[in-house]
Image (tube, rainbow, N blue to C red):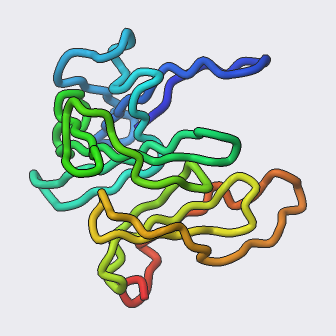
Amino acid sequence: FFSKGCSRTGPGDDFRGVGVARWSAPGDLLAPRTDGPVTADPELLFGAGSFQPEAAVLRVGSGADATLYAWDCHEIASLAFQCRLGRAPEARVDAPSAWTFWTGSAWSATAPPAILFRSAGSVLTVSWNAALGRYLAITGGWGADAVYYRTAPAPEGPWSSERVLFEVERPVVAGLWSLFAHHHPGWDRDDGA
């Protein structure tokens, strides 16, 4: 996924939306669309003000059966974020009609997505943790002195409350906190135990 917008020297940015870019080899950047645009910009999958799948992406399954789950965590108040979930078959992730959204009780292509949870940060990493037998979400936060986690039996939840995974030292430069905390499942030992 990529975001498109314009930064300004004054207040606010001109956010345009989110699109999907695919490539098969370095230098072969493509942004195919398989059905009509939902925005004025044909590169974009979701326009400004709609679902913005930028917080985390999780691939479940393999081959032709793979599904991408994507989280949208947007700010609702100073340093408070709420997260929503959408999904699409990996083969059709660039088609707006392929997306469905978790409503809190079912997947729907038309109903608005439900709030899964509130978070300290807008950047998540979500992965399957074999040792826990659950999905694991890791996040930091603006101004946070900790990295947080929560777990769920399925990508759509129900998610546990946010808990402190570990505390971090305050940075030398004010404002550089644990915002971009990530879990790297490839570095796990013993299935993430």
Q: Is residue 158 left or right of residue 185?
A: left
Identify the image quadrant of the C terminus.
bottom left
Q: Position of residue 59 (x, y in %)?
A: 28, 56
Q: Is residue 17 left or right of residue 11?
A: left
Q: Position of residue 26 (x, y in %)?
A: 38, 41
Question: Which residue does the image show at 46% across and 48% down from the upper left?
Answer: 83
Question: Which residue does the image show at 35% across and 33% down from the upper left?
Answer: 21
Residue 6 picture quarter: top right
Q: How many marks?
A: 0
Q: Position of residue 151 (x, y in %)?
A: 41, 71
Residue 157 picture quarter: bottom left
User: Does the rendering let one see residue 185?
Assistant: yes
User: Does the rendering let one see residue 183?
Assistant: no
Question: Which residue does the image show at 31% across and 29% down from the upper left?
Answer: 30
Question: Which residue does the image show at 17% across and 24% down from the upper left?
Answer: 34
In this rendered view, identify the residue nearer to me: 179 or 28.
179
In this rendered view, identify the residue nearer to me: 106 or 142.
106
Q: Is residue 150 left or right of residue 5?
A: left
Q: Is residue 21 left or right of residue 83?
A: left
Q: Is residue 112 above or below residue 169?
A: above
Residue 108 picture quarter: top left
Residue projecting furthest to the top: 40
Q: Is residue 56 above or below residue 112?
A: below
Residue projecting furthest to the left: 64
Q: Position of residue 1 (x, y in %)?
A: 40, 38
Q: Is residue 182 above or below residue 31?
A: below
